[in-house]
Image (cartoon, rainbow, N blue to C red):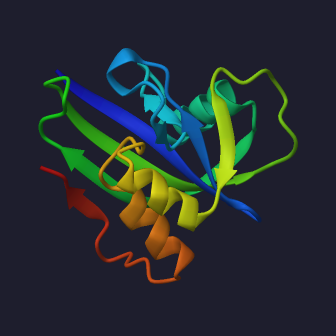
Amino acid sequence: MIAVVCSAVIQGEEGFLLVKEFKPECKDKWGLPGGKLEENESLSSCVRREVLEETGFTVISDNLLCVVNKPVTSEKNSVVKFIFKCEIAGNPTSKAAHEYNFISIDKIKSLDSEDKLRGAEILEILESIHNNTFDKALILRTIN
């Protein structure tokens, strides 16, 4: 099965917004808010819907950061993930489906070393944004 997924990078004063997963295969790992594209849904609508569902935040999502291709996941699927840079457009407007928090880049590095991050690309992307070294020319990444 091929899944199209949209995720959000949201940077706040205290760090990056991450959500705690509760699916059995990734329980208690932290990841970017996001999820699967639904039928007849645009990519930007998908990322806005997923962030709202998972965190309660309404976001603006006009900036595609990168596309991550993961040919084989731990669930034996193939995933194409569109990662958007988003901005929060106000206070949470609904109840969050996930535990979430703004986490500093140092804590994210610690989570990565403890195998508590979901997605091999997360640390690299967030660190490069934090350090202002994100290379927009490398928009497509393949994770094996």
Decide if residue 64 is in sight here.
no
The answer to whether residue 93 is left or right of residue 107 is right
Q: Is residue 12 above or below residue 19?
A: below
Q: Is residue 12 above or below residue 32?
A: below
Q: Is residue 97 above or below residue 110?
A: above
The location of residue 7, given as percent across then percent down, is 48, 43
Query: Residue at position x 45%, y 83% from top?
Result: 133
121 or 137: which is nearer to us? 121
Decide if residue 106 is in sight here.
yes
Q: Quadrant of residue 104?
A: bottom right
The answer to whether residue 143 is left or right of residue 124 is left
Query: Residue at position x 19%, y 30% from top?
Result: 74
112 or 31: which is nearer to us? 112
Q: Quadrant of residue 39?
A: top left
Query: Residue at position x 41%, y 45% from top?
Result: 117
The answer to whether residue 132 is left or right of residue 16 is left
Query: Residue at position x 52%, y 82% from top?
Result: 132
137 or 112: which is nearer to us? 112
Number of callouts in the render?
0
Q: Which quadrant is home to the N terminus?
A: top left
The answer to whether residue 112 is left or right of residue 73 is right
The location of residue 138, given as percent across then percent down, is 28, 72
The location of residue 126, given as percent across then percent down, is 48, 64
